Amino acid sequence: MKRPSNVTAFPPTRFRFSPRWILIAVAAGFLLIGGFSCFFTVSPESVAVVQRFGKYQYTANPGLHFKLPYGIDTARVLPVRRQLKLEFGFGTAQATNPEQMGEYPERERDMVTGDLNAAQVEWILQYSISDPKNYLFRTRNPGSTLRDLTEAAMREVIGDRTVDEVLTTGRNGIEVEALRRLKEMLKPLDMGISAEQVQLKNVHPPGPVQRSFDEVNRAQQDRETAINEANGEYNRVIPRAKGLADQRISGAEGYAVQRVNEAQGDVARFKELLAQYEKAPDITKRRLYLETMNEVLPKLGPKIILDEDAKQFLPLLNLQNK
């Protein structure tokens, strides 16, 4: 088959692969990666520890910073201005701190008290990074080390308390004592960590004996209620009884003073009469007799006094009913 005379034939074009383009692309990628790896940013609540081939160089404050590219310098950002926490015996889902939850929380919360009873204790440690350099280079795995130290301190404190103290009244003392012991453990290690607070969460007996402990707690609460009611009744009755006793004592003392004064007055009056009697016995006797009759006769009612020799005195009496 022949080609038409009016069609022009062109030779096929071929793309020629040149090694120079590969070198250019590699160089551009290398420069691009180096450009992106030269800079790093530190958030306001953090600092960055810069290492050169693994050796510490300096600590960078918040902001934009330059470093050598291609992995020569590496920057590890640490949240030094944010409070971190470790959870023991339980775990919060989607925690920002990868070391916040232990691997076996059910083992962490099982403890033995000083009186050889079992208790399940859940608590939180709040801490902060005080020295980024020491935090990274003084201790291997500082997070797990801190977790082990905190658990050891808490077990020591729980082992010194009775189960009643752990479950009821001793929570505040346990928190304070556990924090104190943890700080004593951290001080010689110089890990760059500052322990700030230990907070107890759920503290309860093991499941098989939970019902028995609840009954004991209810009995203790009933006892406290009865004691409080008795104290209230005591505070209500005793002051009133004391007041009544004081009132009667005061009345008796007043009556005693009154009788003494009356007796002294009678003695003084008797002495005066005796002095008068010694001066004039007959006159004094008659005066005393008259004064006494004057006091007695009005109290006897109507009386008729007759001479013993008088006869037929009935007509003289006024016997009309009034």
Image: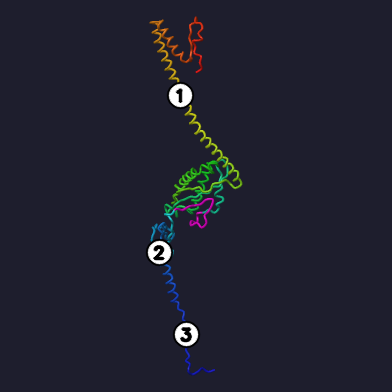
Q: Closer to the camera, 201 or 288?
A: 288
Say if 9 sits above or below 236 in the image: below
User: Is disc 3 in contact with disc 1, using a CB cutoff of under 8 Å?
Assistant: no
Instruction: Tell me the mark number nearer the camera, choosing from 3 and 1.
Output: 1
Instruction: Tell me the mark number nearer the camera, choosing from 2 and 1.
Output: 1
Answer with the quarter of the image where residue 33 lies: bottom left
Q: Amino acid at mark 1?
A: Gly
Q: Which residues are magenta?
A: 83-100
Q: Which residue is mark 3?
A: 13
Outermost residue, right side: 208
Q: Closer to the camera, 263 or 279?
A: 279
| Quadrant for the N terminus in the image | bottom right
Q: Position of residue 43 (x, y in %)?
A: 41, 59
Q: Closer to the camera, 277 or 156?
A: 277
**Does dot 1 land on a helix, a strand or a loop?**
helix
Q: Which residue is mark 1?
A: 251
Decide whether the magenta segment is chiefly helix, strand or loop. loop
Compared across the picture, whether 92 is left or right of 133 comes to: right
Specify whether residue 314 is painted magenta: no
* Label 2, residues with CA under 10 Å away: few <14, some 14-19, many ≥20: some
Report how far apart the C-alphas of labels 3 and 2 lie in the structure. 46 Å
Q: Closer to the camera, 113 or 256?
A: 256
Q: Which residue is mark 2?
A: 39
What residue do we see at 39% from left, 8% from top? 276
What residue do we see at 43% from left, 56% from top? 79
Q: Amino acid at mark 3?
A: Thr
User: Is disc 2 in contact with disc 1, using a CB cutoff of under 8 Å?
Assistant: no
* Label 1, residues with CA under 10 Å away: few <14, some 14-19, many ≥20: few
Instruction: Tell me the mark number nearer the camera, choosing from 3 and 2.
Output: 2
Specify whether residue 88 is painted magenta: yes
